[in-house]
Amino acid sequence: MNKEISTPFRTKEILAKYGFTFKKSLGQNFLIDSNVLTKIVDQAELTPESGAIEIGPGIGALTEKLAKRSKKVVAFEIDQRLIPILEDMLSPYPHVTIRHSDVLAADVHQVISEEFDEGQDLMVVANLPYYVTTPILMKLLEEKLPVRGIVVMIQKEVAERIAAKPGSKEYGSLSLAVQYHAIARTALTVPKTVFVPKPNVDSAVLHLELREKPPVDLMSESYFFEVIRASFGQRRKTLLNNLQNNLLGKENKPMIEEVLSETGIDGKRRGETLSMEEFAALSNAFYKRKD
Ligand code: SAM
């Protein structure tokens, strides 16, 4: 029986055998620590009936671990050069399907309906390419895929921003955009040394448990996010100033003040202190006054 793909020795051997060279532009930093990979898969709480969707399988280190713990794995890989390597490496696992595609351009709903059973427990598990972490996460969340959750290795600083609570310096529109769709926590932090090549930044595993229904009632989802973006426009400015300057205009100051007093939110506060519920109350009150 061959050793696991993820051991440093096997990884080196595979890269040499196929003459593979890393493309920095595709965020290719492969994991070479079996324990870290096991911890990532543990976070997904898969059962033998679960399905796993992976983004960017590389040479298959994480894919192999997922294959051992689930009924089916579907992995999206953008780099054509990796497809034959993956087909070879994962040939002992016929329940793994590799899709050669850019996940950002893929119709993931369609892939899910083709590859998995209806109602099957599904998790997205990935060591994401860092250059496109946020677009990939937002695509997965906004498309409201039928998945239980998402477990991803990402840049530590981005994981902290995503999981941040109101009042912290990391809290911002990204925290709210993700937390609207999911309950977020940083599961573990990971040193640079577990990758080849070593990235320039530290990493963390982010755990997202998708919400069955939104945590706040909104009159307009898109307007809610406009209010949030405006409120964080200039972080040193007060909420009142940001709303005036970035969304509603100075001429509407009296209306803004009226809404702030109606919702019990002090206009001198900064955006970063407002909870999701307070942003929802604000955006609904402004939205009602829109013509
Ligand atoms: N899963 C492997 C591991 O943990 O060792 C590799 C992870 S590496 C950080 C990211 C992988 O994502 C690379 O294989 C890269 O080619 C792939 N990738 C980059 N952009 C992608 C995209 N838009 N769609 C699908 N795969 C992508």
Image (spheres, rainbow, N blue to C red):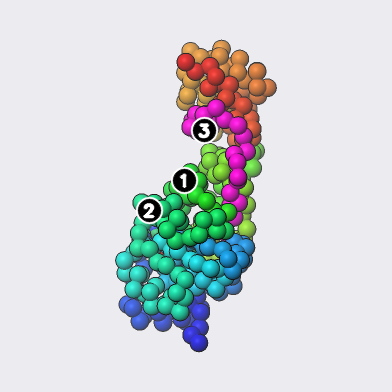
Give the distance between the C-alpha atoms of the residues marked 2 and 3, in whole angstroms: 24 Å
Image coordinates for residue 199, horizontal then vertical, percent: 46, 63
- For residue 116, the mark is none
Say whether marks 2 and 3 touch (CB < 8 Å): no
Q: Please name the residue shown 34% across and 73% down the image.
A: 84
Up-down: is 236 above or below 136?
A: above
Give the distance between the C-alpha atoms of the residues marked 1 and 2, in whole angstroms: 11 Å
Q: Is residue 22 left or right of residue 291?
A: left
Disc nearer the start of the sequence (3/1): 1
Q: Is ligand 1 closer than 8 angstroms to the Cβ of mark 3? A: no
Up-down: is 49 above or below 211?
A: below
Boundaries of the magenta span: 205-233
- Tell me which amino acid carries mark 2: Ala
Image coordinates for residue 64, horizontal then vertical, percent: 50, 73
Disc 3 target residue: 221
Identify the element where label 2 is drawn. Answer: loop
Inspect the magenta stretch and tell me whether residue 197 lies in it: no
Q: Please name the residue shown 48% across and 85% down the image.
A: 2
Disc nearer the start of the sequence (1/2): 2
Q: Is ligand 1 closer than 8 angstroms to the Cβ of mark 1? A: no
Disc 1 target residue: 143
Disc 2 target residue: 106
Q: Please name the residue shown 59% across and 39% down the image.
A: 214
